[in-house]
């Protein structure tokens, strides 16, 4: 019988070795790697055939982790995060401690606290943030379920998580927001 713990252990081993995983998040299935490892991040850019000027989302397990990876400390942001009930990614200024090729040209980084049980456990046990980007080649539609992910993607990662592969619920990408220089909320994607 398959156990979530088996998936966690296998995923941890791949992440620690700089490999890529295909895994369920609180939104859509994602391609992930160690967000502090430039070589691993480069592998995702190559796999997705994506310009390295387009940034990826980073998943963390809790609010404290956000403080480790950005110098933008704004209590309004944390109040907002606590009040939203759908997965929401926040773009933070002044990223730090992450792979250089993961940080946008303007120094920002998109971070989401992931509360999905498998993903949150994985991040906690790994002890570092994990990249999350949609499981598709750039320019192709975002797969909204595991069954929609192309064979090219499945064959190009080092490990595919078995947990939640049979989910029939159609998932959606997260909302994306940021705060402008005047401290106003800007919604980038609903």
Image (spheres, rainbow, N blue to C red):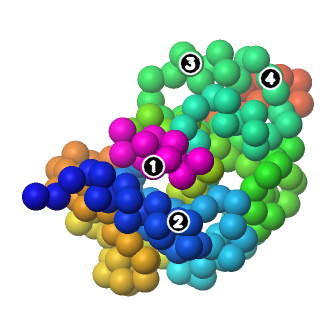
Q: Which residue is mark 3?
A: 82
**Where residue 133 sits: x, y (%)?**
53, 60
Range drawn in magenta:
117-127
**Where residue 59 sits: x, y (%)?**
57, 47
Q: Is residue 93 visible?
A: no
| Extreme-left residue of the structure | 1
Q: Nearer the viewer, residue 116 or 8?
A: 8
Calculate the distance from the C-alpha at mark 1 to the C-alpha at mark 2.
Answer: 10 Å
Q: Which residue is mark 1?
A: 122
Q: Upstream in the sequence, badge 2 or badge 4?
A: 2
Q: Nearer the viewer, residue 93 or 181?
A: 93
Q: How many marks?
A: 4
Q: Which residue is mark 2?
A: 15
Calculate the distance from the C-alpha at mark 2 to the C-alpha at mark 4.
Answer: 31 Å
> Residues at badges 1 and 2 in contact (C-beta under 8 Å)?
yes
Residue at disc 3, secondary structure: helix
Q: Which residue is mark 4?
A: 74
Calculate the distance from the C-alpha at mark 4 to the C-alpha at mark 1.
Answer: 27 Å
The residue carrying pointer 1 sits among few (fewer than 14), some (14 to 19) or many (20 or more) residues within 10 Å by Cα, namely many
Q: Quadrant of residue 61?
A: top right
Residue at disc 4, secondary structure: loop
């Amino acid at each position: 019988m398959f156990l979530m713990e088996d998936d966690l252990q296998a995923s941890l081993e791949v992440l620690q070795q700089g490999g890529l995983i295909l895994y369920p998040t609180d939104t859509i299935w994602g391609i992930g790697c160690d967000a502090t490892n430039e070589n691993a991040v480069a592998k995702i850019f190559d796999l997705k055939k994506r310009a390295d000027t387009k940034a990826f989302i980073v998943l963390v397990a809790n609010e404290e982790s956000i403080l480790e990876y950005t110098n933008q400390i704004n209590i309004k942001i944390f109040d907002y995060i606590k009040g939203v009930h759908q997965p929401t990614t926040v773009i933070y200024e002044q990223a730090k401690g992450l792979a250089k090729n993961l940080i946008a040209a303007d120094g920002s980084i998109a971070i989401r606290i992931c509360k999905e049980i498998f993903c949150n456990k994985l991040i906690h046990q790994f002890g570092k943030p994990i990249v999350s980007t949609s499981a598709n080649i750039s320019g192709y539609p975002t797969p909204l379920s595991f069954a929609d992910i192309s064979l090219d993607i499945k064959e190009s990662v080092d490990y595919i998580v078995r947990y939640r592969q049979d989910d029939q619920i159609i998932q959606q990408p997260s909302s994306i927001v940021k705060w402008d220089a005047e401290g106003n909320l800007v919604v980038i994607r609903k």
